[in-house]
Image (cartoon, rainbow, N blue to C red):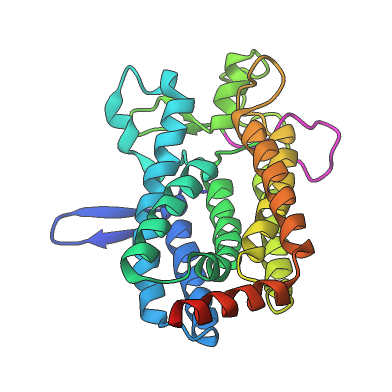
Amino acid sequence: MRRILFKIPLPFLHTNIPVYAYGFMLMVAFLTAITIARWRAGKENIDPNKITDLGIYLVCAGIFGARLFYIIQFFENYKDNLLNVFKIYEGGLVYYGGLFAAITTLLVFVKLHKMSFLKLIDILMPSAALGLGLGRIGCFLNGCCFGKVALHIPWAISFPRTIDKAGMIDGSPAFLQQYELGLVQLSDTHSLPVHPTQLYSFLSDIALFFILSVYFKHRKRDGEIALLFGIIYPIIRFSMEALRGDNPLIFHLFTIAQIISMVMFVVSVTLFIISRLKPVKVVAQASNQYIVSKKV
């Protein structure tokens, strides 16, 4: 865990600007994802500059939606100090909230620029998986999104007890939660070992990126990459939620993310099967007949 990667000195002001790991990795994730998306857009005869513009809109909308979803889910942690809502550098983003906000923004963008929504979202989805994976490294360095206690797993991680400038204990999130549950004492220097769910997610999302990239050239029609993402990612997220120790259960059954994952999985599988079963040539012939009839 390393919340602050480094500090930029300002000699004339006698102070330093801290560079937080979470925010830094979000920046790395965005730049990497947008570079891959620009390259793929060029191969699909789409102006890469439009992808850059869209990427900026999407990241702003995504962060807003992801933060809003997190605040709604954990409002108890913010109701006494609403200014903490703006401390994004401390972590606290829910991917599904960002995904829904980004899709809404994408719909508006393609409408204004008269572009193909399905082709565009296919181009973006591999990059989204890659960016999500890189972002999980930020989660790991920040200490958020931690897993359940795992005493007998050799690769389990113990997060440190951290102290703020005033000498008060302010983390890590895993340590604070375990202290509230009576699992550790304030005199302990580290939390109990937990599943490194951030690293599990990183590896899973990188694997998803490669799967989508390989399948991209084998798709029958636009939209299939997005549907394949909608099938595989919910499985990853559902599994990670089962191992995470920071998300509350609804009715002691599932987390909010698991419920969304199940719905997203069923819808995506249904649409993917319909897409693969529907003959491409029939669609093309129907489109040609429609165009000819319009000309007549």
Labels in figure, total: 0
Residue 176 lies in the magenta stretch: no
Measuring 86% from the left and 34% from the top, which residue is drawn there?
A: 152
Residue farthest to the front, as pictured: 296
Residue 147 drawn at (x, y percent): 68, 35
Residue farthest to the right, as pictured: 152
Q: Eyeballing the image, is 185 above or below 122?
A: above
Q: Could you say which is closer to the camera, residue 144 or residue 36?
A: 36
Q: Could you say which is closer to the camera, residue 187 or residue 209?
A: 209
In the picture, residue 283 is in which quadrant?
A: bottom right
Residue 196 is at least partly visible in this image: no
The segment highlighted magenta reads 147-160
Q: Could you say which is closer to the camera, residue 232 or residue 5?
A: 232
Residue 148 lies in the magenta stretch: yes
In this picture, residue 225 sits left or right of residue 92: right
Residue 126 drawn at (x, y percent): 61, 66
In this picture, residue 5 sits left or right of residue 154: left
In this picture, residue 73 sits left or right of residue 149: left
Q: Could you say which is closer to the camera, residue 270 or residue 102?
A: 270
Measuring 36% from the left and 79% from the top, which residue is drawn there?
A: 49
Residue 114 drawn at (x, y percent): 37, 71
User: Magenta region's main secondary structure?
Assistant: loop
Measuring 72% from the left and 42% from the top, which residue is drawn there?
A: 266
Q: Eyeballing the image, is 137 above or below 209?
A: above
In the picture, residue 183 is in which quadrant?
A: top right
Residue 277 is at least partly visible in this image: yes
Residue 272 drawn at (x, y percent): 72, 57
In this picture, residue 120 sits left or right of residue 126: left
